[in-house]
Image (tube, rainbow, N blue to C red):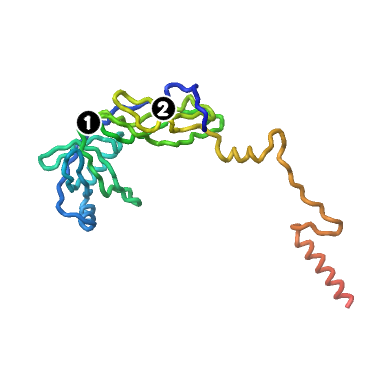
């Protein structure tokens, strides 16, 4: 995957910045696994508030409300106006931990941010369109699912769009081909491959095993010598001859 296509149009777009949402949190004085289990049993999620000169605070939020916050189009990059008692903080959910089996949220960190200071966050890349190379028998091979960007919190795009509609077989899309919205800088190495349209490994293997211009060799079964049984042929017939011979010998006796 060293080639680079010049045939595709502007490859990447972006969606609008995420909307803000509100969430209320409660302070918690106790720590430990036992306390966390009791909170979850009561329908709450243990949380931590930190960053931007703030003293780290142990909190809890309603599990249902937290679920709704994280299940918008903005995903984990949603801006949250978090209210703690009489204080309000502009935060981003970070380090979201989930139960591996149930998928429920078991812990979340809230990073305090400022509208006047840039932050660094990962933004998801979403494919759009259909690559001509796929119609030619290829597949889209993803190398990166997200890129690191720097911008103000209110300018974080929901995702970047990878338009693959101009990619033929062996075409490659690099980070340098991505187009970020105004005010957003992509920090990921520009030479890294985002995706490529490649020949599936199965087809490559078949091609390697077949010499170009020749038919695959056909292995013929060896001919059996006269009077010899071919291996694998009916044991029933062999058994019948043996039984007949035994009967004749018995008769002679």
In the rendered structure, find residue 176 and report the number of the disc placed on it. Answer: 2
Give how far across and how far down residue 251 sits, in percent.
87, 75
Which element is circle 1 on?
Answer: loop
Residue visible at 76% across and 59% down? 234
Q: CA distance from mark 2 to mark 1?
A: 25 Å
Between 5 and 190, the one lying in front of the other is: 190
Which element is circle 2 on?
Answer: helix
Q: Is residue 61 left or right of residue 144?
A: left
Q: Is residue 102 above or below residue 249?
A: above
Residue 194 in view (yes/no): no
Residue visible at 49% across and 29% down? 172
Between 236 and 52, the one lying in front of the other is: 52
Q: Is residue 230 left or right of residue 79?
A: right
Q: Is residue 216 above or below residue 43?
A: above
Q: Residue furthest bottom?
A: 253
Q: Work out which quarter of the rendered image holds the C terminus and state it.
A: bottom right
Give how far across and how far down residue 237 sits, in percent.
79, 61
Quadrant for residue 82, please give it.
top left
Residue visible at 54% across and 29% down? 169
Quadrant for residue 144, please give it.
top left
Residue pointed to by mark 1: 117
């Amino acid at each position: 995957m060293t080639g680079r296509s010049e045939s595709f149009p502007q490859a990447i777009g972006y969606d609008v910045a995420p909307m803000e949402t509100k969430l209320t949190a409660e302070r918690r004085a106790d720590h430990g696994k036992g306390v966390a289990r009791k909170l979850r049993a009561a329908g709450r999620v243990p949380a931590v508030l930190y960053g931007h000169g703030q003293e780290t605070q142990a909190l809890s939020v309603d599990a249902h409300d937290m679920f709704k916050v994280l299940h918008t189009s903005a995903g984990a990059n949603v801006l949250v106006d978090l209210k703690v008692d009489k204080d309000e903080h502009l935060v981003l959910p970070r380090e979201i931990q989930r139960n591996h089996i149930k998928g429920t949220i078991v812990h979340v960190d809230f990073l305090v941010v400022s509208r006047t200071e840039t932050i660094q966050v990962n933004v998801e890349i979403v494919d759009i369109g259909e690559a001509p190379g796929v119609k030619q028998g290829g597949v889209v091979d993803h190398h990166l699912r997200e890129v690191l960007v720097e911008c103000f919190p209110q300018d974080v795009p929901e995702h970047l769009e990878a338009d693959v509609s101009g990619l033929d077989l062996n075409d490659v899309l690099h980070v340098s081909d991505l187009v970020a919205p105004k005010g957003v800088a992509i920090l990921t190495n520009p030479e890294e491959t985002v995706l490529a349209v490649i020949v599936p490994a199965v087809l490559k293997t078949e091609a390697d095993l077949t010499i170009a211009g020749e038919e695959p060799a056909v292995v013929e079964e060896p001919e059996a010598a006269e009077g010899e049984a071919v291996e694998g042929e009916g044991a029933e017939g062999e058994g019948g001859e043996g039984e007949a011979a035994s009967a004749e010998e018995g008769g002679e006796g």
